[in-house]
Image (cartoon, rainbow, N blue to C red):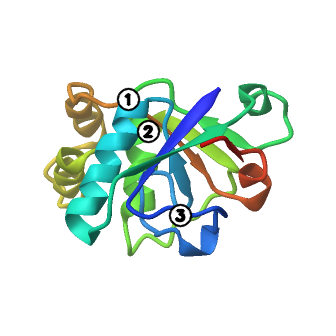
Amino acid sequence: MILYHGTNCDFSQIDLGKTKPYKDFGKGFYVTDIQHQAFELAKNRCRIWGGSPIVQEYEFDEGELQSGALSVLRFEKVCVEWADFIYKNRNRSANFSHKYDVVVGPIADDGVAYLLNLYEEGLRTLEELAKELEYKDLNNQFCFLTDRAISLLHRVK
């Protein structure tokens, strides 16, 4: 499969040390199987940080997700467990960590951050949060969290 990474500056080596914490699935390298989504993310980065939109392409053998060689967590759709996992990863005071090599599932947008804040303030239950998130237009993302997982990505463009 081909996976896409949207950025505002090109690079040849993926450095997990340069990735940011408190993202949906943790501190890792995020890609999508939707080229247009990667381009939109690249444009957003350029609006914030400058530069030009770049979409990098990586080849990945999706059989690796089922091979048992990697610890993989997959969310097929928005659900209570997905919302809770994102909340824990984004929460700066939760001191949450996990041991997955790769996490796959829907991407959360800024509207999701607002809903997560409502949950954090006690204005939504986890079940209400998951139900409200069901109606968001969410796309797929893959987060590669370890060097072992990163080594299976092969840049093609």
Looking at the image, tell me whether mark 3 or mark 1 is earlier in sequence order. Answer: 3
Please, what secondary structure does the residue beneath circle 1 have?
loop
Question: What residue is shown at x 20% (from left), y 25% (from top)?
Answer: 135
Q: Looking at the rendering, which quadrant does residue 63 occupy? A: top right
Q: Which residue is mark 2?
A: 82
Residue type at mark 3? Lys
Find numbered disc 3 in the image and state the secondary structure of the residue it sits on.
loop
Q: Is residue 119 above or below residue 128?
A: below
Q: Classify 10 Å Cα crowding around label 3: few (below 14), some (14-19), many (20 and above).
A: many
Q: Is residue 110 left or right of residue 70?
A: left
Q: Cα distance, mark 3 to mark 1?
A: 20 Å
On the rendered structure, is 4 left or right of 87? right
The three-letter amino acid code for the residue at tag 1 is Val
Separation of residues labelled 2 and 3 (CA atoms):
16 Å
Q: CA distance from mark 2 to mark 1?
A: 6 Å
Q: Badge 1 is on which residue?
A: 78
Q: Which residue is mark 3?
A: 27
Asked if the residues shown at circle 2 and circle 1 are in contact, with their CB atoms under 8 angstroms apart, the answer is: yes
Q: Which x, y percent locates residue 156?
A: 66, 41
* Quarter of the figure with residue 39: top left
Could you say which is closer to the camera, residue 153 or residue 148?
153
Give the answer, above or below, for where 42 lies relative to 92: above
Q: What residue is at 49 percent from the left and 52 percent from the top?
A: 25
